[in-house]
Image (cartoon, rainbow, N blue to C red):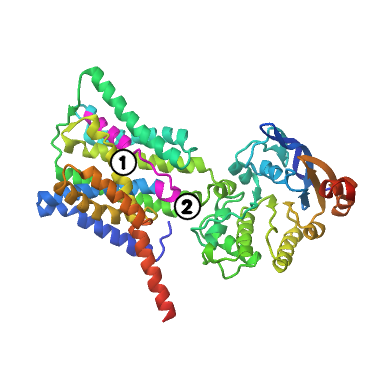
Amino acid sequence: MSATVLSLRGATKRFGGLVAVNGIDFDVTEHEVMGLIGPNGSGKSTTLNLISGALKPTAGSITLHGTEIAGLAPQEINRKGVARTFQLVRMLPSMSVLDNVMAGAVFGHRRAWGQAARDKAMALLDRVGLSGRANNRIGELTYIDTKRVELARVLACDPRILLLDEWLAGLNPSELETGITLIKSLRDEGRTIILVEHVMDAIRSLCDRCVVMTSGTKIAEGTPAEVLNDPEVIRAYLGDDDA
Amino acid sequence: MNLSRDDIPALAFSALLLGLAAMLPLTGSSYWMGIGLSIAMFTVLSTSWALFSGPTHYISLATAAFFGLGTYTVGLGFESLPFWLLIIIAAAIGAALAGIVGLATLRLSGVYFVIFTLGLAELVRQLTTWVQNLTGQRGFYVLTDIGETEIYLMLVGLAALVFLTGWLIGRSRLGFALRIIGDDEEVARHSGINTARAKVLLFMVSGLVAAATGAILAPRYVYIEPSLAFSPILSFQVVIMALLGGPGRLWGPLVGVIPFTFLWEAISSSFPNQTTLVLGIAFLVIVYALPRGFVGLIEDGRHRLRAREGYA
């Protein structure tokens, strides 16, 4: 039985009268890849934002290795070991590729500086397939390469848990294959990952377990095969007729 | 500390320039001393302003508030305390005020921050005027035996300190954090950077330097009153000069200060009654024609040169 890394209990987020996330419970254990799926507007990204600290939960608890992190500022949560990518990729446009990755290495969960940070960033650029691009400017990169840079920056934080917010979205079919292989290699390293994703192939091949959300509520949890055959899940995605 | 191969010539060159600047009083010309004083003063103010505003893109119009507090510190204390101590007290007051203002306002972004700092400078000026009216004074005399040469040399010394501080910050984690904040504050926060602390620290540095500059210049004014010490135009001049040079590089503001001082000198002697008007026009022209300042112009030129060599 592996240790629980992250657990949510009754995590809730209200925006005025709208309940975006309604009392979500789930646990993520070490070395597990957990998929957070559901139709558009079901509250997946909001849940991720609650974990990363971008939004403060209205109620409920979120613990990382038993320590409460709900309501902390994003920089504090990051330093405790939660690192994320963004749904719309976010780069540091005035800096080189190397500096973008060093940002994670210098300020993240495990902090390095100078040559150590540079070596770490270079190693991660190799890791995500950007060898030799260290001195490029961000504007010179293709879309998938900016995604790789963001992934390397996040890995440079040495996170205990990695949050990927639709990291595969917007890739063309061949890029998608490369992207899935890359995430799979992270999974094989034994990293703990939560991914919000729409690409079903990716969910089937990457996730150990999935949590399905609709209208802010968890409706199913289990292996990808289990949840994707669950009538409730099919109804949430496709409506009553197909269930 | 590790110095790279490029650092030593750059440091030596800077030291040489500062040494040359410090020899200006030897010319014995009062015209050149006047120009030199202006350049030294605005170099210090614009460079320290750009330490904060350059990387973060937060435009502060509060320079006059810190500067005025500095001159008033000297005005109130020059009879009882040594001058050097007053400069340190002024710097401490400037840093403290910047710290308080920073904690209260750096959550504001963009135009709200600009307006707040402008309002702050005006508030401090009005408060000072009000207190002085209560005590029945308009202003007061600062009579010391400190002459232009001493003031000039102190400013050059302060400029050296500002450049050294800026250089050290640029190589530090704090400097790297500020660049990240300037690019994307959300990424900075999610990379573990305490963005509020980094911004407040740098704002305190610029507040400290502006207050110390005000203190050093107080003896030159002889008679100080709120409209002079807290003159809002000072805040604008500092911003214009820094933008003209280019706030993205440590030496950027300096390349703005020197031509602007001569321009200002020419404007105020040729159009003594329309200086503000001309200043406004100069501001518009600079923002439209040189959005990245002289630094941007120089770097574009270099880039084009390199590109041409690449094709040759």
Q: Is residue A231 visible?
A: yes
Residue A187 in picture, x, y percent from top left? 75, 58
The mark nearer the N terminus, 2 or 1, is 2
2 or 1: mark nearer the eye: 1
Q: Determine whether, in the image, residue B104 is placed left or right of residue B93.
A: right
Specify the principal SS of the magenta part: helix
Identify the mark at residue B99; answer none if there is no mark.
Answer: none
Task: Identify the chain of the residue marked 2, using the numbered disc in the image.
Answer: B
Task: Judge by depth and name the residue closer to the eye, B7 or B2.
Answer: B7
Q: Amino acid at mark 2?
A: Arg
| Residue B58 sits inside the magenta stretch | yes
Task: Judge by depth and name the residue closer to the eye, B274 or B149.
Answer: B274
Q: Is residue A243 visible?
A: no
Task: Examine the image and state in which quarter residue A167 appears.
Answer: bottom right
Eyeballing the image, is B165 above or below A201? above
Q: Amino acid at mark 1?
A: Ser
Q: Secondary structure at mark 2?
A: helix
Eyeballing the image, is A52 above or below B299? above
Q: Residues in magenta?
A: B53-75
Q: Secondary structure at mark 1?
A: helix
Residue A19 in picture, x, y percent from top left? 72, 35
| Residue B177 sits inside the magenta stretch | no
Quadrant for the N terminus of chain B in the image:
bottom left
Q: Which residue is mark 2?
A: B179
Residue B45 in picture, x, y percent from top left? 30, 45
Q: Residue furthest bottom?
A: B312
Categorize mark 2 by other alpha carbons within 10 Å: few (<14), some (14-19), many (20+): many
Q: Which residue is mark 1?
A: B235
Task: Examine the image and state in which quarter residue B133 appears.
Answer: top left
Q: Determine whether, in the image, residue A195 is placed left or right of residue A228.
A: left
